[in-house]
Amino acid sequence: MNFSLPVLAPSILAADFANLEQDITSALEGGAEWIHCDIMDGHFVPNISFGPAVVKKAAAVADEAFIDVHLMIEHPEKYISDFINAGADLISVHYEACVHLHRTLTQIKQQGAMCGVVINPATSLSSIDPILEEVDLVLLMSVNPGFGGQSFIEKTYERLQKLSEIRDEKGLGFLIQVDGGVNLKNIRKVAGAGADVLVAGSSVFSAKDITARVQEIREKLSDL
């Protein structure tokens, strides 16, 4: 991956689906290099979002972008192939949703994508210690998953710093991603706490000028 960290990953969950192609294009024109796809099934989380068909559309529009798929679903192992075939470059699955987490992560890698593990705000960092050597990315949820537009949970700053320390102590190279409540006011602090990849949904796609908003966010991150 040839990205200059920290990376902004606009989440299309907050985009206007009637104008999805234009919204994605506007984000890319602002300099976004990742497109984040939040997949919800109405079981693991209470909301339902979209599936592989929308990811395939996003990947076609964002041909040069990195397609980052976050599965907030039960039994994610059943759908890995579908999302990789749709264009996913990386698939992240929840620790809380996987009975056989190592097997699922291995499945993702064997099918040619990068793999990530996600933990909810109440899940201990120690729970994923056994698989840290296996993953390309760790996603810390900074809200309780299932809905866009929630407020950032302040405890996440401490968790980001601790995860960054663990990575350094173990000499590992996984990226640290944060998702939920990231906005113009807190994005520098979030990145400064250790986040390499910052997911932003409402703060990007609610803007009247999406391109300008992405440029504004990237400017805030430019000297970190």
Image (cartoon, rainbow, N blue to C red):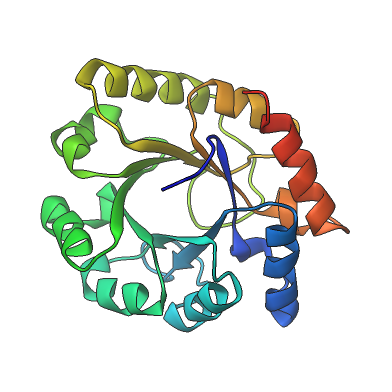
Q: Is residue 75 visible?
A: no
- Residue 60: x and y in percent read 54, 78
- Residue 130: x and y in percent read 13, 35
- Residue 11: x and y in percent read 59, 58
Q: Answer with the quarter of the image where residue 65 lies.
A: bottom right
Q: Answer with the quarter of the image where residue 7 lies.
A: top right
* Left/right of residue 182 with respect to residue 122 in the rendered view: right
Taking depth in this image into account, of 193 and 212 the one nearest to the observer is: 212
- Residue 84: x and y in percent read 33, 72
| Location of residue 192 with respect to 152 vertically, above or below | above
State which quarter of the image contains the C terminus. top right
Q: Answer with the quarter of the image where residue 166 lies.
A: top left
* Tally of marks: 0
* Left/right of residue 141 with respect to residue 153 in the rendered view: left
Taking depth in this image into account, of 76 and 114 the one nearest to the observer is: 114
Question: Which residue is at a point 48% across and 25% down the rendered structure image?
Answer: 194
Q: Farthest residue toward the front?
A: 2
Question: Which residue is at a point 66% across and 32% down the rendered structure image?
Answer: 187
| Location of residue 37 with respect to 179 vertically, above or below | below
* Left/right of residue 37 with respect to residue 71 in the rendered view: right
Question: Which residue is at a point 58% across and 53% down the rendered structure image?
Answer: 33
Question: Which residue is at a point 29% across and 29% down the rendered structure image?
Answer: 125
Taking depth in this image into account, of 32 and 210 the one nearest to the observer is: 32
Q: Farthest residue toward the right?
A: 208
Q: Is residue 202 visible?
A: yes
